[in-house]
Image: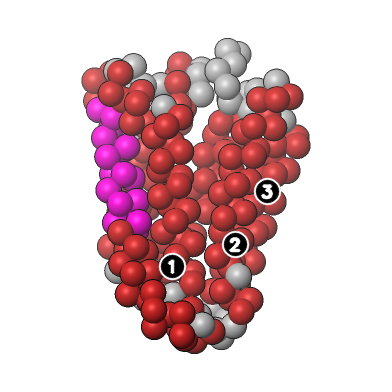
């Protein structure tokens, strides 16, 4: 097996599982009555994304890599992303078409990635051959941008139910700005989600790979 930066380090995988546990706490808090604890989910969401960066750093530092690790990391990313979009849609903070778009994109892209990755025996982010595809899908700068935008969107969204109740005076001052920033990050996240899917689909079509 060729190693291309994917990781299968037990410590890294433990960190990945930890962020999934934190995700469950965030979901539970979102459905509680407005409280300072619910407002604290802002920091828990940040911690989830910090763990996402940390598991890769730990694996690279320990030089333990595998194809499984890449797919496990992507699967964990999907669980966080899809769970958060479904939850915020369920409490009517975003329209239903947003989680539907993200789910359809995730299933399509991950199916293509899994097929191509298995057939070539290389990690998913090493699949892109065009320079544009490598930049949009696999480059560190674009991956960091996408993760940051999603983190900002989710951090802001989880505060919307409790912020006006717990900190009404502050909300009166910055509530409009906070709301506008929230939905700026929401729609930018959806835009990047779609744009980053295009090279993956194009790679599949150009290589005439059978997906299913």
Q: Which residue is mark 3?
A: 17
- Position of 201 with respect to 110 (left or right) is left
Give the CA distance from mark 1 to mark 2: 12 Å
| Rendered image coloring scheme | secondary structure
- x and y percent of residue 186 in the render? 34, 58
Name which of mark 3 and mark 1 comes first in the sequence: 3
Name which of mark 1 and mark 2 comes first in the sequence: 2
Q: Quadrant of residue 132?
A: top left
Is residue 89 highlighted in magenta? no
- x and y percent of residue 33 in the render? 56, 85
State the SS at label 1.
Answer: helix
Choose mark 3 or mark 1, whichever is in front.
Answer: 1
Name which of mark 2 and mark 3 comes first in the sequence: 3
Picture layout, residue 111 above or below residue 126: below
The segment highlighted magenta reads 185-202
Residue lying at the far top of the rendered structure? 2
- Position of 160 with respect to 176 (left or right) is right
Q: Quadrant of residue 94?
A: bottom left
- x and y percent of residue 21 in the render? 67, 58
Residue at 37% over, 31% down: 137
Q: Which residue is mark 2?
A: 43
State the SS at label 2.
Answer: helix
């Amino acid at each position: 097996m060729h190693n291309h930066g994917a990781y299968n380090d037990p410590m890294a995988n433990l960190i990945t599982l930890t962020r999934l546990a934190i995700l469950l706490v965030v979901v539970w808090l979102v459905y509680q009555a407005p409280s300072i604890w619910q407002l604290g989910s802002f920091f828990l969401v940040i911690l989830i994304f910090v763990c996402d960066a940390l598991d890769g750093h730990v694996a690279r530092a320990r030089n333990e890599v595998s194809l499984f690790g890449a797919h496990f990391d992507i699967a964990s990313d999907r669980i966080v992303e899809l769970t958060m979009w479904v939850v915020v849609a369920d409490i009517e903070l975003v329209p239903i078409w947003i989680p539907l778009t993200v789910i359809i994109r995730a299933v399509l892209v991950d199916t293509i990635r899994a097929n191509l990755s298995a057939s070539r025996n290389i990690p998913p982010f090493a699949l892109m051959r065009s320079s544009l595809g490598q930049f949009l899908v696999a480059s560190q700068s674009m991956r960091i941008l996408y993760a940051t935008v999603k983190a900002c969107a989710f951090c802001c969204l989880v505060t919307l139910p409790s912020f006006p109740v717990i900190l009404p005076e502050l909300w009166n001052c910055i509530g409009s700005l906070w709301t506008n920033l929230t939905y700026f990050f929401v729609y930018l996240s959806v835009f990047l989600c779609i744009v980053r899917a295009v090279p993956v689909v194009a790679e599949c079509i150009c290589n005439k790979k059978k997906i299913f």
